[in-house]
Amino acid sequence: MKMVTWTLIYATLLVVLTEPATPKCVETPRGLIEHFWTGDTDASDIVGGNDGMLEGATVGEEGMVSGACGFNPGDRVDLSKTITLEGDFTAMAWWKTSSAGRHTLFGHGDNVGRDYLQIRNQWRYKYLIDGASGNDGYNAYVDYALNTWNHVAMVRRKGFVTVYHNGIKLDPVSEPLYGPFHIGNIGRCDDNWNAMSGQIDEVLIYRRALNQNHIKEIYEAASEGVCIDPTK
């Protein structure tokens, strides 16, 4: 009888220990997130109240986490207020495209001066902060896949900007960039220059620099996404 009992216990433990962990959503205290656009059913900001207006863009498309925003070139989500990020911040999103061209994930401004985070030509991200200052932007290099969901996080810590692709830190890190980073649109800048063609999901803004472990945890949560703990 004892032999049978211990055999059953051992078999149960073996199943528990060898069964792959089930991804779960990344619980985040409400106070850590500044803005959150899910794209599930509309363009509302479920944390910061900075709701967007759909200009050609659609919501509820098949996303990485529930629904996503879909864009044809020229479409955008026009935010009701332009966000100005000074000091440390993290801006992240899931994205997918079938085109190897240039696509703006979020941005602000026009040819007089613009800020943005873009994917370019299937081998790099490009970003510009305080575009009116006249510099030409910075690159972070990676060969990314088309027709699949990718995750990006842009992090500024003490002036230095780092880009993470699918939870992995990319090179190079920028020189110190202390100017403000503006976000007024999802899917393009104020004009149609390098507008997005594809889908964008789960746009999150933090007024703090997340560490790599936190970013990787969000990436590995995949379709479970980020869930907000309203009690914290």
Image: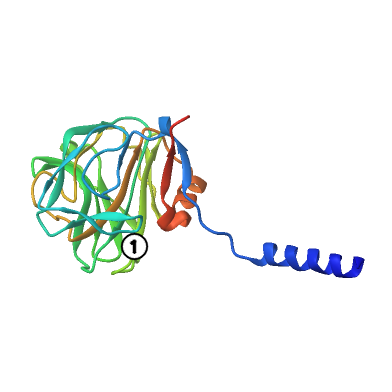
The residue to which callout 1 is attached is: 149
From the viewer's perspective, tell me whether residue 26 is left or right of residue 98: right
The residue at the far front in this view is: 1
* Residue in front for this viewpoint, 8 or 37: 8
User: What amino acid type should be assigned to the residue bearing mark 1?
Assistant: Trp
Q: Position of residue 88 (x, y in %)?
A: 38, 33
Q: Is residue 226 above or below residue 209?
A: below
Q: Position of residue 215 (x, y in %)?
A: 45, 48
From the viewer's perspective, tell me whether residue 195 is left or right of residue 3: left
Q: Is residue 74 above or below residue 77?
A: below
Asked if residue 194 can be seen in this view, the reply is yes
Please name the residue shown 35% across and 30% down the image.
Answer: 87
Q: Is residue 16 above or below residue 38?
A: below
Asked if residue 169 can be seen in this view, the reply is no
How does the figure colour the protein chain or chains? rainbow
Label 1: few (<14), some (14–19) or many (≥20) C-alpha neighbours in 10 Å: some
Corner quadrant of residue 35: top left
Total label count?
Answer: 1
Corner quadrant of residue 155: top left
Please name the residue shown 73% across and 66% down the image.
Answer: 14
Q: Position of residue 158 (x, y in %)?
A: 41, 33
